Amino acid sequence: MNIATEPKLSGKPLDDKPRKRTRPVLWFIVVGSLLAALVGGFVWFNMFRDKMIAQFFANMKPPPINVTIATAGSETVPNLLTAVGDLAAVHQVNVTSDVSGRITEIMFTPGTTVKQGAPLVQLYDAPDQGDLANYKAQVTVAQLSLDRAKQLASRQFGPQATVDQAQAAYDQAQAGVAKTEALIAQKLVRAPFDGDLGVRKVEVGQYLSAGTQIVSLTDLSQLWVNFTVTEKDSGQLKVGQTVRIGVDAYPGRTFEGKITTIEPQIATDTRNIRVQATIANPERILKPGMFATATVVLPDKPPVLTVPETAVDYTLYGDSVFVINEKKTDDGKTALTADRIYVQTGDRINGRAVILKGLKEGDRVVAVGQLKIQSGAAVAISTDPPPPVPAKPPRY
């Protein structure tokens, strides 16, 4: 029997066994191990990097920022009520003529000071002077007639009616003289009071109509300060209170006066009340029409809490300050931090801001340097002193 020719036999030796396929499994194991090691390395590297970055920033804290501090303290601040107004002359007029006529003489120099009754302008009055002479002659004749009638009546040679007629004629002549003298006086324009003259508005030979302005006359020795205050503040005002005036023409300088008039009614459209103060002007440097800031000195209020005005940060979201707080660090040392807190502010007077709510007496606040810090930042106290109050603070 030939084994090779058997159809059911494969022709392989009978002692050969099938081999196991181990190479692909080993390849997958090796590749998987490499991938796992690579991924693990990336994860470990990221964790190590984050840890080192955190450790770096933890050890690299920014140094404290130097700031100047001030202590909130209680003090009595001036109780002032400020308003705006303008100056007006107590005596001011545009000099005019009562009658019409041609100017024959101008007897003043523009810009000079004149006394009450000083002649300023002469109008043509020759016809009136003639009438005056006529009436004076009539007075003389009427006087003689009256004396003669009285003598005759006293001797019973004339009736009393003749005396009465003579007296009436005399009185009429005297009235004519008085009227003519008044007309003549109207044509000599005089200064109605002491004051300073302004710019001349007329010329010699000009026909002056009644009411036409000749020159302005202003008494600068005393001025009025007219200003308004709100209805809410009107209850604090009284006649006689001191008023301090400031004008743009003389910055840093104040002028004092007294309240002389308070309007008895409040304007319905603005709910303001008009107040008038009188102020002396011996140097004649204040002028009517100047814009003025009026400050009424009111009775003192109880002491209030104040800080330097530079310590307050004024924003649309509210007013705030940076308060200095002490904190313990991990190593037991004391560190200073600046924390922002919001406060309610009041008036600002002479470089100080009144704090109504949010602080207590003795709190230390950042007066200079708050623009460089954020809330919770570490700070160090600078040796620089806090900002001083202005040497000559405005009093209005």
Image (cartoon, rainbow, N blue to C red):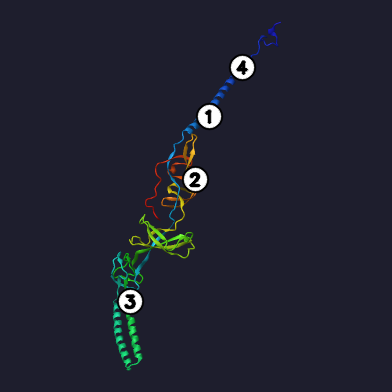
Instruction: From the image, tell me which residue sits under label 3.
Output: 183
Lateral position of residue 138 relative to residue 13, left or right: left
Q: Nearer the viewer, mark 4 or mark 1?
A: 1
- Gap in angstroms between the C-alphas marked 3 and 1: 114 Å
First in sequence, mark 4 or 1: give its number.
4
Q: Which residue is most to the bottom?
A: 157
Q: Alpha-carbon neighbours of circle 3 within 10 Å: few (<14), some, or many (≥20)?
A: some
Which amino acid, by three-letter code, is at mark 4? Thr
> Image point 30% across, 84% down: which residue?
139
First in sequence, mark 3 or 1: give its number.
1
SS of the residue at dot 4?
A: loop
Instruction: From the image, tell me which residue sits under label 1.
Output: 47
SS of the residue at dot 2?
A: strand
* Badge 3 vs badge 1, beta-carbon distance below 8 Å: no
Q: Quadrant of residue 80?
A: bottom left
What is the x, y in percent for residue 298? 44, 58
What is the x, y in percent for residue 18? 65, 13
Q: Nearer the viewer, mark 2 or mark 4?
A: 2
Q: Quadrant of residue 246?
A: bottom left
Q: Alpha-carbon neighbours of circle 1 within 10 Å: few (<14), some, or many (≥20)?
A: few
Q: Tag on residue 22? A: 4
Q: Nearer the viewer, mark 2 or mark 3?
A: 2
Q: Quadrant of residue 214?
A: bottom left
- Gap in angstroms between the C-alphas marked 2 and 1: 39 Å
- Gap in angstroms between the C-alphas marked 2 and 4: 75 Å
Q: Tag on residue 341? A: 2
